[in-house]
Image: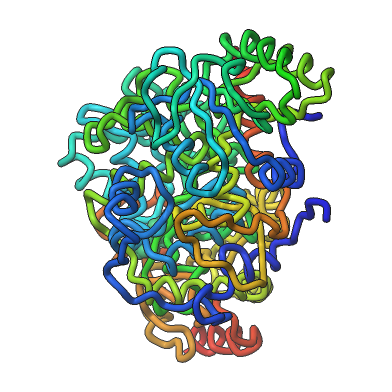
Amino acid sequence: MNHDAYDDNYIRAILNSVKSIAMVGASPVNVRPSYFAFKYLAQRGYDMIPVNPGHVGKSLLGKPFVASLGDIDRPIDMIDIFRNSSHIMPVVDEALKLSPLPKVIWMQLGARDDAAAEKAEAAGIQVVMNRCPKIEYGRLSSEISWMGVNSRTLSSKRAPIPTQGMRLSLNRMSVGGGETAASDRAAKNKSELS
Amino acid sequence: MTDRHPGFSTLAVHAGAQPDPTTGARATPIYQTTSFVFNDADHAASLFGLQAFGNIYTRIGNPTNAVLEERVAALEGGTAALAVASGHAAQVVVFQQLLMPGDEIIAARKLYGGSINQFTHAFKSFGWNVAWADSDDIASFERAVTPHTKAIFIESIANPSGSITDIEAIAAVARKAGVPLIVDNTLATPYLIRPIDHGADIVVHSLTKFLGGHGNSLGGIIVDAGTFDWSKDNKYPMLSEPRPEYHGIKLQETFGNFAFAIACRVLGLRDLGPALSPFNAFMILTGIETLPLRMQKHCENAKAVAEFLAGHPKVAAVNYAGLASDRYNNLARKYAPKGAGAVFTFSLKDGYDAGVNLVSNLKLFSHLANVGDTRSLVIHPASTTHSQLDDAAKVKSGAAPDVVRLSIGIEDKEDLIADLEQALTA
Ligand SMILES: Cc1ncc(COP(=O)(O)O)c(C=O)c1O
């Protein structure tokens, strides 16, 4: 798996297939990115589970916090890690002890740990790094186009009207290249500088 | 289905547009409305808090404008865009995100006269300073860098001179200085040059010109390349620091590689207010659908007219980068292999008066202050668009007193040449 540039089909298949998502590092503070993503994904119909030992006893949008992945009482399809790159490995180690194993481990925008990704992939888990599932869902459904964002998809089909709680079609034709080429260059520029 | 890479012409027609969800309308509707109803109180709060994607009020966003934004972002290879009321509005909104009083930008001297005015006078009143550099001398950009420098601004093809800028060389200076490179790509359009492919971090346009293309609608746009890390130091607090106007949200952390476009919308457009009319967005979108066809014709005609003028006994010099003899021809071959654009200047052997005569004798060319119309246009920059500069600055910006500027349209080239011929001999 090339973790510098994902094929849209890879992301699309993940978002189309997973149902339950445990969000590690979910915050109840309503200006944090994790709160935005949690709320959005819950509204799109995913079974969201907030994981944060600091908030056990409280709930996030009606979903009770759990302290750790091991405390979740049902199979988890995807783990969305809202932690810095340096905190990824212990979460992956914990995920690898689950039975059944999660199908997907997703690391949030800005988070990347290639060693942890390799470990998860060796166990047959799909990995996404340095992406936000809310942004990717909004992009592939073109809902994010309201914000002038380049969805890199085209469609000649009538779009469904986005309403609360509705799953949107992600099956648009992808325009590869665009953003990934630019973000590759940004990464390259950064490594050239350092 | 595997990921495909649709070509430029496909994107020019389709990107951003989809049949209307409610009516099935295939052309993009003009959403001529100020405001949009919320589903409920929570939806309203989510939209105002930037938690949900959606429409609130046309000063902040509009579905017709959004199609235009996505289309231009796709054509430029950027992550997102923001449409505004004019090219000048785009520049103000961009710099408001980057500059605090006392900060500096470095700008190429060869710029549209209106941009020179904006930077020199309006920006000065905001406490933003400009250091001028010479695009033909890359080291002059390097020498201009100071600890206060926050951005570098150039035009890909300069107005009025039609000269081609070495974008990659200046991008390297910007990268070394740790500041974004902003490219005004108005005269090239993404059909001829895609500055992001050459290292630009932000692209701005006056949509009024070739993108709209029909001389009927003002507009401007800002494209975010998604390449700049705004949080690596605290030079760009609008993007890296908690925003008090949104209860402490950090824009880059929340929006990743399209945070700059979001900042321009939710801080710049929201607070400064230069919103684009959805009607203008519709006109410009319709123009963009034929951009590739028009640019081919504009460039083919421009080259033919430039060649005709270069061979005319009354003409002293023609500055068109598409001519093999032009000093910018190598740069044109590198950056604009499909054509060197359709705006260029020439001068007459009999000087200023002959230029004035020529303008009044033309019958098909229109004498007006615009470029990038289907119609061919002519103007004398030194007495109009660049009149506020002193003589030395006029020469440096490519608008010397004896220079006439043409913007070549998409008429039949034989008719344009015949009009120039009769006006030169009249
Ligand atoms: C290169 C360039 N940039 C910016 C502008 C300003 O655009 P507007 O007139 O849409 O504000 C112009 C207008 O002539 C231009 O030619």
Q: Position of residue A31 (x, y in %)?
A: 34, 32
Residue furthest front as drawn: A73
Q: Quadrant of residue B305?
A: bottom right
- As drawn, B131 above or below B309: above
User: Is residue B173 shown left or right of residue B121?
Assistant: right
Q: Position of residue B8 (x, y in %)?
A: 69, 62
Q: Residue at x 76, y 55 (%)?
A: B5
Q: Residue at x 55, y 33 (%)?
A: B171
- As drawn, B111 above or below A30: below
User: Is residue A145 shown left or right of residue B390?
Assistant: right
Q: Quadrant of residue B369?
A: bottom left
Q: Position of residue A63 (x, y in %)?
A: 44, 33
Q: Residue at x 44, y 27 (%)?
A: A64
Quadrant where the N terminus of chain B is found in the figure: bottom right
Q: Quadrant of residue B243?
A: top left
- As drawn, A99 above or below A6: above
Q: Is residue B238 visible?
A: yes
Query: In front here: A62 or B171?
Result: A62
Q: Is residue B399 visible?
A: no
Q: Residue at x 58, y 85 (%)?
A: B416
Q: Quadrant of ligand 1?
A: bottom left
